[in-house]
Amino acid sequence: QAHLVESGGDLVQPGGSLRLSCSTSGIIPDLTPTSWYRQAPGKQRELVAAILRDGSPTYTDSVKGRFTASRDYAKKTIYLQMNSLKPEDAAIYYCYGVTGLSSGGQAYWGRGTEVIVPS
């Protein structure tokens, strides 16, 4: 059973927008989603955006100015607003989260949501 659940992936034309969401299943009480990664076919998984402890987001250079990461603390959900999508953004997008230190700081991955941007 996935403890992190992504949604929002879809096929979108270049220049279009999508909003991804990642929430916890609730089974692990202190699991917090923190980051978005993506993996395109034949490529390594890469960090796209992360929300730091102070709540501020950080981005990989290729998405700066186009993607916006945010978090709803109450819902334990993170979002990735993706604008001006390009074919090179096509990938499976994964959510990453960790538990608190008192729970061992364990890392979890979601199963991914696919973003398709045709060239």
Image: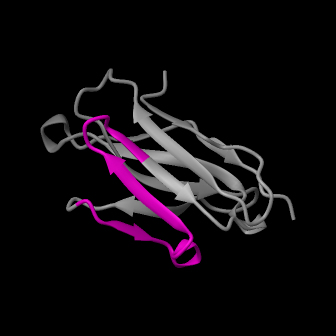
Q: Residue furthest bottom?
A: 61
In the rendered structure, which segment of residues is drawn in magenta? 55-78
Q: Quadrant of residue 69 in the image?
A: bottom left
Q: Residue furthest right?
A: 119
Magenta stretch: includes residue 71: yes
Decide which of 30, 16 is in the foreground and name it.
16
Assign the C terminus to one quadrant of the image.
bottom right
Q: Residue at x 25, y 39 (%)?
A: 99
Query: Does 12 sit above or below residue 44?
Result: above
In the image: residue 15, left or right of residue 32:
right
Total labels drawn: 0
In the image: residue 58, left or right of residue 117:
left
Query: Does 58 sit above or below residue 73?
Result: below
Query: Does 26 sit above or below residue 84?
Result: above
Magenta stretch: includes residue 27: no
Decide which of 99, 52 is in the foreground and name it.
52
Q: Residue at x 42, y 29 (%)?
A: 3
Residue 42 place in picture, x, y as percent? 75, 59
Q: How is the image coloured?
A: one colour
Q: Residue at x 57, y 70 (%)?
A: 66
Residue 51 place in picture, x, y as percent? 34, 59
Residue 77 place in picture, x, y as percent? 37, 40
Query: Does 95 sit above or below residue 85?
Result: above
In the image: residue 92, left or right of residue 74:
right
Q: Quadrant of residue 46 in the image?
A: bottom right
Residue 24 place in picture, x, y as percent? 38, 31
